[in-house]
Amino acid sequence: MKLNLLIIDDDVNFLNTAKKILQYGFEVTTSKNGKNGIEAFQQYDFQIVLLDMKLPDISGLDVLRRIKEINPFTPVIIITEYPDFENAVQAMKLGADDYIQKDFNFDLLKSKIEKLLETRDLKVALKYLKTEAELIRNEFIYASEVMRKLKIEIERIANLDVDVLLTGETGVGKDLLAYEIHKLSPRRDKNFVMVNLAGIEPNLVDSELFGTVKGAFTDAVNRMGKFEYANGGTIYLPEISEIPQSTQIKLLEFLQYKKITRIGSNKDIRVDVRLIFATNSDLEKLLSAGKLRDDFFYRISVNKIHIPPLRERRDDIIPLAEYFIRKYSSQYGIRREFKLNDELVKAMLSYSWPGNVRELENMIRSSIRDDVDELRLEHFPYLYERISRSSSIKPYKLAEAEFRENYFKNLYHQANGDINRASKLSGISSKYLRRILKSLGIVVK
Ligand SMILES: Nc1ncnc2c1ncn2[C@@H]1O[C@H](COP(=O)(O)OP(=O)(O)OP(=O)(O)O)[C@@H](O)[C@H]1O
Ligand SMILES: [Mg+2]
């Protein structure tokens, strides 16, 4: 997904050139004067604005001020002609985020934008960047029979253009598959918009999704919501238990009539959006806890796809592990082919992976190294520890020693270090207790 960029400048030649260059990285909108620029900014979601200070109608400084009023988080970069630095400096003082000369090259502008998005807490803009970056960071890897079938099902559903509900434990790949459905669908060239409602206050969810008109509530401006932004594409709601009941009603209406209304308006807007929902909770529980309306639940679970946990498709484990090893090796600049030794393979296959693919990925990301040719279990202390914890039968002597140590440590603790109390609690003479505690390295007062 590309960031939306607005250029406000009266120099038509410049607008044309800039548009040509920038369209490779951005969705570019141009505006020839201040008034139109502000209007466009009010109506659509822009993540970056390029602004000329000399405009035919309103002064650039006034445009800047208005833009910052509407959305203080959107970075504004001033375009300057070479000798005009003074004006740019003035604009920076008034809230512009950076400036760039008119004959900029694409890479310079791109790096400036990236820096602005990185160094400031630009939640709004980053939401788009992040979702995209996060989702396309992995290929969809599978080898098991269940996942092979699921892939076929996904291809079929992707083309049907129906809404979908993905279920499955945390980390099984719901986000990845939601994006996969979008990519395989005829909507692939349009936006894929993930709306994580967990990060949004419940009373702002509707405006986030459906947009607002000026005056809908204090501070409300004309702003498009995610539905309009995603028009032609896909909206992904990754956790249905986060959807307020009142919003569930509105979503149902949308599913029926394919229309939305901005908050504070009574005008219907026709939008063409496919919805993909997901949850990692138990659906029955969500229903009985009253988090989901029955009608909403029945409507969205018509096309339900369940992604099984990793422990139920063990054939995927090693191909996924090898994929993540390749991926992080190349990311860390490690140029080595690894072999996984048998013990490690066995451990990976027998572990239950409660955090599913995410857990496997995290483990590999944090343990990959470049000083060995063969990866062994000892190189993955995380896995080693979990495997030994779960194999519950230990040699008796070891188990007894562990029990003894725990018992006396707890006892000493409970008695607040008072040996006579500990003696009473345990029924062991204080003299003997002293000896045991000392042998365990506990200093007795
Ligand atoms: N089949 C797969 N191939 C490659 N990577 C995968 C696969 N499945 C999951 N992943 C990766 O594992 C991580 C977790 O997956 P994802 O975020 O899609 O899980 P989720 O089901 O949405 O979890 P949650 O319920 O916690 O949101 C991501 O980095 C994802 O790219
Ligand atoms: Mg998810």
Image (cartoon, rainbow, N blue to C red):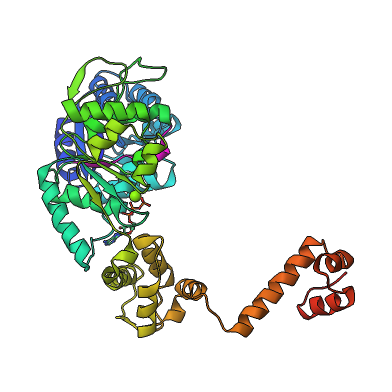
Ligand 1, by image quadrant, is bottom left
Image quadrant where one finds the C terminus = bottom right
Question: Height in image: 381 above or below 418?
Answer: below
Q: Left of 4 or right of it: where is 344? A: right
Residue 88: x, y in percent? Answer: 37, 34
Image quadrant where one finds the N terminus = top left
Q: Nearer the viewer, residue 401 or 336?
A: 401
Q: Left of 218 or right of it: where is 421? A: right
Residue 54: x, y in percent? Answer: 28, 26
Residue 163: x, y in percent? Answer: 19, 40
Asked if residue 197 lies in the magenta stretch, the reply is yes
Residue 406: x, y in percent? Answer: 69, 71
Q: Which residues are magenta?
A: 191-201
Question: Height in image: 393 above or below 14?
Answer: below
Asked if residue 193 lies in the magenta stretch, the reply is yes
Circle count: 0
Q: Nearer the viewer, residue 307 or 443?
A: 307
> Which of the 4 image quarters holds residue 216?
top left
> Which of the 4 image quarters holds residue 6?
top left
Q: Nearer the viewer, residue 326 or 119?
A: 326
Residue 373 seen anywhere in this rendered image of the structure: no
Question: Height in image: 221 above or below 172?
Answer: above
Residue 77 seen anywhere in this rendered image of the structure: yes
Q: Nearer the viewer, residue 167 or 298?
A: 298
Residue at the location (29% across, 24% down)? 42
